[in-house]
Amino acid sequence: MVGHTGIYDAAVAAVSATDVAVGTILEAAQKHGYVLLITADHGNAEQMRDPVTGNPHTAHTTNVVPFLMVGEGLKFKEEKQVEEEGKVKVGEGAEAAKKEGEEELDPPALCDVAPTVLDIMGLTIPDEMTGRSLLAH
């Protein structure tokens, strides 16, 4: 929650503490053969000041957040994407997507996290879920 204060030094300290904690968790996960996923539902610490007013920016941002995965033998799909009219076309490249009529997909989003976790666990992704697994098979 420190990002919501708009206090830069507090955000730097929080990110540093989180980095140390994630390092400890990563070491344990690797030691025991676990998969580690790291993501967030929004950004905030990357924009601490309103660019127009210079005042503290304390609200969520809509900036892209990372989705990191560490685990033996697992990879995210290496989709080449091109944005066109608000949609992302997925395929071997922009021209391939246009010419071959590849499926149009929304960019990876928060709704894809749970299906990806279920896929890692080897469980069925329920039809009710709107997201998709981001794992390469």
Image (spheres, rainbow, N blue to C red):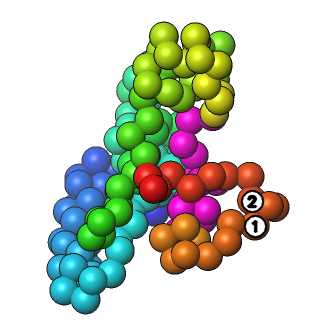
Residue at 35% x, 74% y: name it: 35
Pick whichever, 73 or 16, lies toward us.
73
Q: Position of residue 96 (x, y in %)?
A: 50, 16
Taking depth in this image into account, of 97 and 37 the one nearest to the observer is 97
As drawn, the residue found furthest toward the front would be 100
Seen in the image, is 6 located left or right of residue 26?
Answer: right
Q: Is residue 103 above or below residue 123?
A: above
Q: Which mark is residue 129?
A: 2
Q: Label 1 belongs to which residue?
A: 126
Residue at point 48%, 10% (across, down)? 95
Q: What amino acid is found at the position of numbered circle 1 in the picture?
A: Pro
Discs 1, 2 touching: Cβ within 8 Å: yes
Pick out the residue farthest to the right: 128
- Residue 7 colored in magenta in the image: no
Mark 1 residue crowding within 10 angstroms, few (<14) / some (14–19) / many (20+): few
Q: In the image, residue 134 lies at what x, y percent?
A: 50, 52
The percent position of residue 105, horizontal first and vertical second, equals: 63, 33
Picture quadrant of residue 107: top right
Q: Tell me the quarter of the image containing the C terminus.
A: bottom left
User: Tag 1, which secondary structure?
Assistant: loop
For the residue pair 120 and 1, the one nearer the viewer reads as 120
Residue 102: horizontal and vertical position, in percent? 61, 25
Magenta-drawn segment: 106-117
